[in-house]
Structures are given as structure tokens and as C-alpha cells.
Image (cartoon, rainbow, N blue to C red):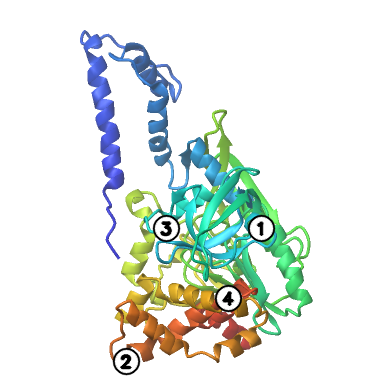
């Protein structure tokens, strides 16, 4: 892992200082005779005064709007790491990501070999209605070639998305057809799920993975809980790994579904905000179900609110690694030009009184590189390397010791897996060989794969093939061969990924994928073991 450039923020500040000095020099001639301009008594008046002097006395015409747009991010940077200014385009994109829906064509795709390959479609969505198939390789979008030209994935998404009712034409390469297939798709409103998957791991254990907190997250989780309980769920694994947060209200509502009425979920306060308590409004649907919550260093903000409430109320076993450590509350403020700011107005605290915000004072340059520091200090692999501040020690009602000052420390630590690091595996992964092989295999057997609707049939299907030999031949064709002992070391890990990717091409889609890939998931296996014990 490369050491970050820790001087970037310092250089930006020097840049701002230089600009201020130059401005002072440029307007200084007018005041060589010590002609002083009176500064009013208001806290911000000096700033207004400087801008007014520039506007009225600077030697050349200026673009005031441009100066303001460039200055605002620096002003916000002086506050905290999470207060920021968003110009119109960025604000629209940020809001759209949390709304739970967008206008588009309703596909998911991967780009394993510089070509976008459709992995799944929303049933009944625009692409499904237009005749797009899983496995199609998108070559052109509106006559613009996107295959083999190293176009970023974000740029492909922008080309495919657009206003509802507008049309986009794609040309795809389809297995078994020599010529490109041209498909016109009318864009429509696409629901964006925040619950990635909800299914039964076994006859008793349910699993829900929540990827973000959008406006629709609570409704999605509530629906998933109800369906799993109807299927016999008696215990639940709730996955918040790499969930960076989002809206706070859904986190409070979801927490309430696991708690008794009147239980404190969290509270928040700030210099201009009095303390505000948040309680469970009713006894939750799943208030008596044994619960394990998976977290890692990518779990932040609303994820930490939820996990912290469940940990402090002795309601769940938290499994994984220390969370990100974001305990600041942002309030959106919108301006008439469609820009806006996300302003930190308070801190949130868990029921025991913990603030989970990790330190940022006097270390702003390092704040964004916290993950790199954790790696350097061994925290991701050794539980004893997790920092604990005894002055921020708290005790839950059940007598469990918890710590504040920087994320949630799990009840059960699971290190990152560093064992699958042979050169063969690293090269295969770097070249997306598992995905590419799976797509090629699925293309050749797509008609049969599309008829597989349960896991037992899928397992029977796999037994007909020697996937190990087939993948090794495929890798050799790409110039990659394992050294002695490497295949034996990594065979299970690689084949499990391949079987999971192929399973995603069946009508079961993500259910098949997660069911298979779970065998490699250390945190998930730890949670299952907790229940079994």
C-alpha cells in the first residue's frame, strides 16, 4: 500500500495564502499613504470588506462568481472533514444517490476485460422490455464505442442514464450471433435497492445485507424481515460492512425494529442544537430474534448509529473490525442556484454516551488516510492493535465494556484474510480471470443455466463439469500457469468464486451468488458459529 501524499492540504493552504498576498500587493498602491479602511465590528465583516475592495478597486475586471466558487471549498475545509460545499452538479448527484431511485435503463454490468457485460436486469424494467439479455456485451451507446477503449465505468453509467422517457440505442455482442444486435431502450424510473440481498442461510438463519441508508431503506428492511420470518427465521445476521451511511432517519427506524418500545437509540447535540433524544417508538418486529451484526472499517455514520444502538443495549453481537468512526451530524442547506452545503451541526452519541467520531483536530492531513494507518499499525490483522482509550470507557446495562473516541470496536474481532496471496491468485484476480471465465462459461451454457431455479439443481449442474481443469486451461491460454503447490493452495477459493459468478447468471441471481460465496466469508462464518454455540 503506497504512503499517501500528506502535504496536499498544506500546499492548498499555501496556495490560498499566496493568492491573498498577491491581492494585497495589487491593491496596496492605493493605500501607500496609510489610508485605512474601517473594519466594522461584525465577525464576518472583514471578509465582506476584502471582497468589496477587490470588486471595486482591482486593476482588471474579475469573475466574482468564479472566485467565490473556488474559495468556498477552502472555507468549509477549515471546519471539519465532513462539512463541505457542493456545486449544483455534485449536489444533484449526491442527492440522487440517497433518493432510492434514478432514471436509467435497469441493468447491472461488469467490465472485466474493457467491455461492459450485462450481469443482470431488473425484471420488467426498460432493458428487459427491450430485449437485452444477461451476458450481452455492450459495444456502442448512441454510436459511441465503449468497448476496448478504456472508458471509465462511471462514464458508461452517465451514457446509459438520462431523463425518463428519453431513448438510448445500444449495440451489443451476443453469444452465438455474429453481427451486433441493435436495441433501442426508453429510459424509465429505476428503483435503486439499498437491501442488496435478503435470504435464508439455512432453515433458521436469515441474512440481510444493507449497502446504504436511502429514503427507502427502512421499508426495504421491514419487508425483508417480514418475508424471512414467514420463511421460518429464528435468528438474523445483519450485514453493514462497507455501508458508508446516508440518511439518519432510516437508521433510527431500523434500529427500532430490533428494540423494545422506549429504548434509547441515540442522542445528538451541538453548540447551536440542544440535546435531542431518539427512542424506539414501538416494540420492533424483530425485537426478540437473536441478532449478529457484521461491520468493518468501511461501516460509517448511520451504520455506526445502528450498530452502536444495538451494542449499547446488549441487543446484538457485533462481529468484524473497528468501524470508520464518523460521529458528526450533517444538515443539508440548499441555495437558490441549486448548490448547497453539508454543514456539521452536532455530534451523535450512543445510548451509553459514546461519541464515535475519531480525532481530526491537528491531523487533518492524515484523517483521510486512516485506513492506511490502520494497516500500517497492524489493526486489520491483530485485535491487540486496536486503540482503546480508558478515559472513554463506558459500560452497558448488561455490564459489557465499550469504548468511544473512534468507531465501534466489535465484540468479536475477525481479521482480514491475507492467506490467499500466491502469485497465481494475485495475477488471476488482477486480470479478472474468474469473472471472465465465468461469463464465457455462462455464455456457452446460457439456455440450460436459465432453467436452474434452485441450489440443489445448480449443484448437480456443477458436478457435470471439471471446472478446475477448464479454468486452468483458460488461464494457460491467457499466459498464466500456477507454480508447484499454488493451485492446491488456492483451488477452493478460486472455484468458489467461479461457481458464485456462474450462479449469478441463473434466475436466482444474487441469492445463488451469496449462498455460494458465503463459504469464503470469514465474518459470516464467525456469526454462524456464534449462533451454533
Q: Which residue is mark 1?
A: 217
The label on residue 147 is: 3
Q: Nearer the viewer, residue 439 or 351?
A: 439
Measure the C-alpha gap from mark 1 to mark 3.
35 Å
| Vertical side of 224 occupied by 60: above or below | above
Tell me the residue at 66%/58% (across/down). Answer: 217
Measure the C-alpha gap from mark 1 to mark 4.
33 Å
Q: Residue 487: image x %, image y %?
A: 36, 88
Specify the quadrant of the image occupied by residue 436. bottom left
Can residue 441 be seen in the rendering of this structure?
Answer: yes
Specify the quadrant of the image occupied by residue 256. bottom right
Q: Which residue is mark 4?
A: 446
In the image, which is nearer the foreground, mark 4 or mark 2? 4
Mark 1, secondary structure of its residue: helix
Mark 2, secondary structure of its residue: loop
The label on residue 485 is: 2
The C terminus - image quarter: bottom right
Amino acid at each position: 500500500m503506497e504512503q499517501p501524499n500528506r502535504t496536499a492540504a498544506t500546499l492548498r493552504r499555501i496556495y490560498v495564502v499566496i493568492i491573498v498576498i498577491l491581492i494585497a500587493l495589487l491593491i496596496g498602491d492605493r493605500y501607500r499613504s496609510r489610508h485605512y479602511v474601517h473594519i466594522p465590528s461584525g465577525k464576518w465583516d472583514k471578509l465582506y470588506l476584502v471582497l468589496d475592495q477587490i470588486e471595486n478597486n482591482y486593476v482588471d475586471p474579475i469573475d466574482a462568481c468564479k472566485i467565490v466558487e473556488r474559495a468556498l471549498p477552502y472555507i468549509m475545509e477549515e471546519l471539519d472533514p465532513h462539512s463541505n460545499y457542493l456545486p449544483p452538479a455534485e449536489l444533484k448527484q449526491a442527492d440522487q444517490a440517497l433518493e432510492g431511485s434514478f432514471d436509467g435503463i435497469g441493468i447491472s454490468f461488469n467490465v472485466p476485460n474493457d467491455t461492459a457485460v450485462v450481469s443482470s436486469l431488473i425484471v420488467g424494467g426498460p432493458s428487459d422490455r427491450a430485449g437485452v439479455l444477461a451476458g450481452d456485451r455492450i459495444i456502442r451507446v448512441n454510436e459511441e464505442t465503449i468497448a476496448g477503449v478504456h472508458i471509465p465505468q462511471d462514464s458508461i453509467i452517465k451514457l446509459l442514464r438520462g431523463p425518463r422517457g428519453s431513448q438510448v440505442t445500444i449495440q451489443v455482442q451476443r453469444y452465438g450471433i455474429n453481427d451486433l444486435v441493435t436495441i433501442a431502450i426508453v429510459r424509465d424510473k429505476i428503483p435503486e435497492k439499498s437491501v442488496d440481498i435478503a435470504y435464508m442461510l439455512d432453515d433458521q438463519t436469515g441474512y440481510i445485507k444493507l449497502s446504504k441508508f436511502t429514503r427507502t431503506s427502512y421499508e426495504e428492511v421491514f419487508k425483508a424481515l417480514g418475508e424471512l420470518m414467514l420463511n421460518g427465521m429464528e435468528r438474523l445476521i445483519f450485514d453493514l460492512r462497507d455501508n458508508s451511511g446516508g440518511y439518519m432517519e432510516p437508521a433510527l427506524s431500523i434500529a427500532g425494529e430490533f428494540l423494545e418500545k422506549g429504548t434509547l437509540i441515540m442522542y445528538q447535540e451541538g453548540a447551536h442544537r440542544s440535546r435531542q433524544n431518539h427512542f424506539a417508538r414501538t416494540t420492533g418486529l424483530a425485537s426478540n430474534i437473536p441478532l449478529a451484526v457484521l461491520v468493518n472499517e468501511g461501516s460509517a455514520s448511520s451504520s455506526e448509529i445502528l450498530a452502536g444502538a444495538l451494542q449499547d443495549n446488549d441487543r446484538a453481537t457485533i462481529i468484524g473490525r473497528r468501524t470508520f468512526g464518523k460521529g458528526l451530524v450533517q444538515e443539508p442547506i440548499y441555495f437558490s442556484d441549486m448548490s448547497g452545503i453539508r454543514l456539521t451541526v452536532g455530534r451523535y452519541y450512543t445510548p451509553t454516551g459514546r461519541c464515535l467520531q475519531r480525532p481530526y483536530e491537528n491531523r487533518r492531513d492524515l484523517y483521510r488516510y486512516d485506513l492506511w494507518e490502520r494497516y500500517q499499525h497492524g489493526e486489520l490483522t491483530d485485535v491487540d492493535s486496536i486503540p482503546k482509550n480508558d478515559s472513554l470507557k463506558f459500560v452497558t446495562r448488561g455490564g459489557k465494556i465499550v469504548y468511544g473516541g473512534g468507531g465501534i470496536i466489535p465484540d468479536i474481532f475477525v481479521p482480514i484474510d491475507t492467506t490467499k496471496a500466491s502469485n497465481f491468485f494475485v495475477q488471476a484476480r488482477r486480470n479478472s480471470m474468474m469473472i471472465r471465465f465465468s461469463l464465457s462459461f455462462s455464455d456457452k451454457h446460457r439456455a440450460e443455466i436459465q432453467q436452474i431455479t434452485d441450489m440443489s439443481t445448480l449443484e448437480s449442474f456443477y458436478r457435470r463439469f471439471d471446472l478446475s481443469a477448464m479454468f486452468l486451461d483458460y488461464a494457460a491460454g491467457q499466459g498464466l500457469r500456477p507454480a508447484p503447490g499454488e493451485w492446491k493452495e488456492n483451488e477452493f477459493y478460486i472455484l468458489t468464486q467461479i461457481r458464485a459468478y456462474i450462479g449469478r447468471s441463473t434466475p436466482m441471481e444474487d441469492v445463488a451468488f451469496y449462498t455460494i460465496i458465503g463459504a469464503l466469508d470469514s465474518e459470516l462464518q464467525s456469526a454462524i458459529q456464534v449462533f451454533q454455540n
